[in-house]
């Protein structure tokens, strides 16, 4: 299994050490769930995100992580007193096994509708990484998409409002999610950013999918015009989750609020993309 280490780490851009299974251990290590903002919970593992948005009329779950983590995610949801059966919608950021792998199990348990972009529909419904269909280590349980989302479409359940922001490149239908994060009387512009890492993607001369280079560049341009106070991501290390939680525990109530964080991360993503493109050119 050690032969799988490189592609698996490349898939996420992960920096954590890997086990003999080829996976960073924090991808599947259970974590005590935590409320990030009013009604918004991290119910994922130590390394992979699953975001629960709650309301009196039902809930929305964004990502589930690895297939084997679905049970832990549902247990975390129930630990706060919420019922899995009250999840109305399932959403995803990217149709890769480390974020969408557990969606099918949660859908079966909850009866929730799966909403996703057209770009990621194929991968979700086939359970494959588009362009790497031959790599079975990238496969995951397929999940049926009940409704296709357009760019800018709003998903509402009670007072939960999430806006789909299409940021393709990392996957063809990579979807970021904008919402208003509330902390007492304060409100902040929050975004769960899908990703813009190259990871295991081929850019040239045999692109992962047609138009991938153009998609990345469109995403970089679009993100420059988006104002974000709270930067969140599918991987804990992509927004320093654990350091921020420690800072909040130490007495900083605004540990997750940083209007400059989006620009710093996007500049790094773009530099890495251009370097990868240059390296892959024939």
Image (spheres, rainbow, N blue to C red):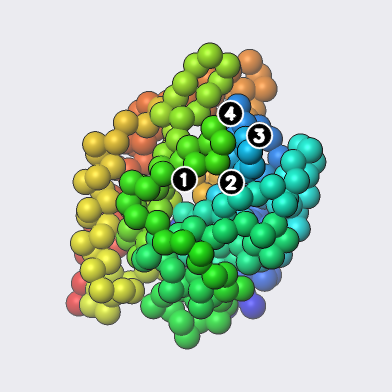
C-alpha span from label 3 to label 2: 12 Å
State the SS at label 1: strand
C-alpha span from label 3 to label 4:
16 Å
- Quadrant of the drawing holding the N terminus: bottom right
Question: What mark, if any, has residue 155 been given in the picture?
Answer: 1
**Residue 260 point in image, percent of width and height:** 35, 28
Label disc, if present, on residue 56 of the rendered structure: 3
In the displayed structure, 206 sits above or below 35; it is below
Q: CA distance from mark 4 to mark 1?
A: 19 Å
In the rendered image, is residue 44 in sight?
no
- Of the numbered discs in the image, which one, if any, rests on residue 37? 4
Disc 1 to disc 3, C-alpha distance = 15 Å
User: Is residue 144 positioned above or below 55 on the image?
Assistant: below
Which residue has dot 2 on it?
60
User: Within 10 angstroms of label 2, few (less than 14), some, or many (20 or more) residues?
Assistant: many
- Among the two numbered marks 1 and 3 on one chain, the one whose residue lies closer to the N terminus: 3
Horizontal side, residue 76 vs residue 142: left or right: right
The residues tagged by marks 2 and 4 sit, at their Cα atoms, a distance apart of 15 Å
Number of the front mark, 2 or 4: 2
Q: First in sequence: mark 3 or mark 4?
A: 4
Q: Are marks 3 and 4 in contact (CB under 8 Å)?
A: no
Residue displayed at 73% across by 61% down:
109
> Label 2's element?
strand
Q: Earlier in the sequence, mark 2 or mark 4?
A: 4
Number of other residues with Cα within 10 Å of mark 3, as a class: few under 14, some 14 to 19, many 20 or more: few
Q: Residues within 10 Å of mark 4 (few under 14, many from 20)?
A: some
56 or 174: nearer the eye?
Answer: 56
**Quadrant of residue 259 within the rendered picture:** top left
Of mark 4 and mark 1, the one earlier in the sequence is 4
Residue 239 falls left or right of residue 33: left
């Amino acid at each position: 299994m050690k032969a799988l280490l490189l592609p698996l780490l490349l898939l996420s851009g992960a920096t954590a050490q890997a086990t003999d299974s080829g996976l960073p251990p924090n991808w599947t290590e259970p974590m005590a769930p935590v409320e990030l903002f009013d009604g918004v919970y991290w119910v994922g593992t130590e390394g992979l995100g699953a975001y629960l948005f709650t309301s009196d009329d039902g809930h929305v779950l964004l990502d589930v992580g690895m297939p084997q983590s679905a049970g832990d995610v549902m247990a975390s949801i129930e630990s706060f007193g919420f019922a899995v059966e009250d999840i109305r919608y399932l959403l995803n950021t990217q149709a890769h096994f480390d974020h969408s792998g557990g969606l099918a199990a949660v859908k079966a348990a909850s009866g929730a509708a799966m909403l996703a972009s057209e770009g990621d529909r194929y991968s979700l419904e086939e359970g494959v990484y588009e362009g790497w269909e031959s790599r079975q280590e990238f496969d995951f349980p397929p999940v049926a998409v009940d409704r296709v989302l357009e760019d800018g479409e709003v998903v509402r359940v009670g007072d939960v409002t999430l806006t789909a922001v299409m940021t393709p490149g990392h996957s063809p239908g990579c979807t970021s999610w904008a919402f208003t994060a509330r902390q007492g009387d304060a409100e902040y512009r929050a975004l769960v950013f899908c990703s813009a890492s190259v990871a295991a993607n081929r850019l040239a001369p045999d692109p992962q999918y047609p138009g991938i280079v153009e998609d990345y560049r469109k995403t970089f341009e679009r993100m420059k015009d988006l104002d974000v106070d709270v930067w969140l991501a599918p991987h804990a290390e992509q927004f320093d989750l654990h350091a921020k939680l420690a800072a909040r525990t130490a007495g900083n109530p605004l540990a997750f609020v940083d209007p400059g964080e989006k620009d710093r991360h996007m500049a790094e993503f773009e530099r890495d993309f251009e370097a990868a493109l240059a390296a892959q050119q024939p």
